[in-house]
Amino acid sequence: MAKYSKAAQENVRRTMLKYKRKELKSGKSGKPVENPKQAIAIGLSEARRKGAKVPRK
Protein backbone atom coordinates (compact mmCIF):
# COMPACT_ATOMS: atom_id res chain seq x y z
CA MET A 1 0.00 0.00 0.00
CA ALA A 2 1.30 3.43 -0.91
CA LYS A 3 2.00 5.83 1.91
CA TYR A 4 1.54 9.58 1.99
CA SER A 5 4.45 11.76 3.07
CA LYS A 6 4.23 13.91 6.20
CA ALA A 7 4.07 17.00 3.98
CA ALA A 8 1.04 15.58 2.13
CA GLN A 9 -0.67 14.66 5.40
CA GLU A 10 -0.10 18.15 6.75
CA ASN A 11 -1.48 19.69 3.57
CA VAL A 12 -4.65 17.58 3.78
CA ARG A 13 -5.00 18.46 7.48
CA ARG A 14 -4.87 22.19 6.68
CA THR A 15 -7.35 21.76 3.84
CA MET A 16 -9.79 19.91 6.10
CA LEU A 17 -9.58 22.71 8.67
CA LYS A 18 -10.48 25.22 5.95
CA TYR A 19 -13.33 22.93 4.84
CA LYS A 20 -14.73 22.75 8.38
CA ARG A 21 -14.62 26.55 8.68
CA LYS A 22 -16.41 26.83 5.29
CA GLU A 23 -13.41 28.74 3.85
CA LEU A 24 -12.51 26.16 1.17
CA LYS A 25 -13.66 27.22 -2.29
CA SER A 26 -14.05 25.06 -5.39
CA GLY A 27 -12.30 25.69 -8.70
CA LYS A 28 -13.34 28.52 -11.01
CA SER A 29 -16.86 28.91 -9.63
CA GLY A 30 -15.59 29.76 -6.14
CA LYS A 31 -18.50 27.97 -4.47
CA PRO A 32 -17.83 26.53 -1.01
CA VAL A 33 -16.88 22.84 -0.96
CA GLU A 34 -19.68 20.76 0.61
CA ASN A 35 -18.26 17.24 0.36
CA PRO A 36 -15.42 16.07 2.68
CA LYS A 37 -14.11 13.69 -0.01
CA GLN A 38 -13.78 16.64 -2.38
CA ALA A 39 -11.87 18.55 0.31
CA ILE A 40 -9.42 15.65 0.71
CA ALA A 41 -8.96 15.46 -3.07
CA ILE A 42 -8.16 19.19 -3.18
CA GLY A 43 -5.60 18.75 -0.39
CA LEU A 44 -3.89 15.84 -2.16
CA SER A 45 -3.88 17.71 -5.45
CA GLU A 46 -2.20 20.72 -3.82
CA ALA A 47 0.36 18.41 -2.19
CA ARG A 48 1.14 16.86 -5.59
CA ARG A 49 1.74 20.33 -7.07
CA LYS A 50 4.13 21.15 -4.22
CA GLY A 51 6.08 17.96 -4.96
CA ALA A 52 5.09 15.90 -1.89
CA LYS A 53 5.11 12.10 -2.09
CA VAL A 54 1.54 11.19 -3.06
CA PRO A 55 0.47 8.06 -4.97
CA ARG A 56 -1.04 8.43 -8.42
CA LYS A 57 -4.75 9.21 -8.79
Image: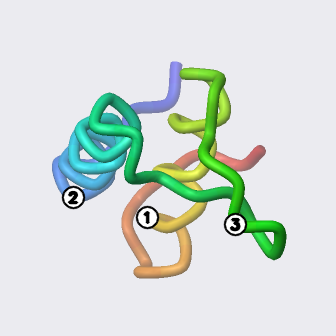
| Front in this rendered view, residue 46 or 30 | 30
Secondary structure under the numbered disc 2 in the rendered image: helix
Of callouts 2 and 3, the N-terminal one: 2
**Disc 3 packing (10 Å; few <14; some 14–19; many ≥20):** few
Q: Which mark is residue 47?
A: 1
Position of residue 54 in the picture relative to residue 26 (left or right): left
Of callouts 2 and 1, the N-terminal one: 2
* Residue 49 point in image, percent of width and height: 54, 79
| Front in this rendered view, residue 43 or 57 | 43
**Disc 2 packing (10 Å; few <14; some 14–19; many ≥20):** some
* Residue 32 point in image, percent of width and height: 61, 46
Real-space Cα separation, disc 2 to disc 3, in angstroms: 26 Å
Q: Is residue 31 above or below residue 40?
A: below
Real-space Cα separation, disc 2 to disc 1, in angstroms: 7 Å
| Front in this rendered view, residue 1 or 36 | 36
Secondary structure under the numbered disc 3 in the rendered image: loop
Of callouts 1 and 3, the N-terminal one: 3
Give the residue displayed 71% in from the left and 49% down from the top: 56
Among the 4 quarters of the image, the one containing residue 22: top left
Give the residue displayed 70% in from the left and 54% down from the top: 31
Q: Nearer the viewer, mark 2 or mark 3?
A: 3
Amino acid type at circle 1 is Ala
Which residue was labeled with disc 3?
30
Q: Which mark is residue 7?
A: 2
Amino acid type at circle 2 is Ala
Q: Is residue 45 above or below residue 13?
A: below
Asked if disc 2 and disc 3 are in contact, CB closer than 8 Å, the reply is: no
**Disc 1 packing (10 Å; few <14; some 14–19; many ≥20):** many
Amino acid type at circle 3 is Gly
Position of residue 31 in the picture relative to residue 44 (left or right): right
Q: Is residue 41 above or below residue 31?
A: above
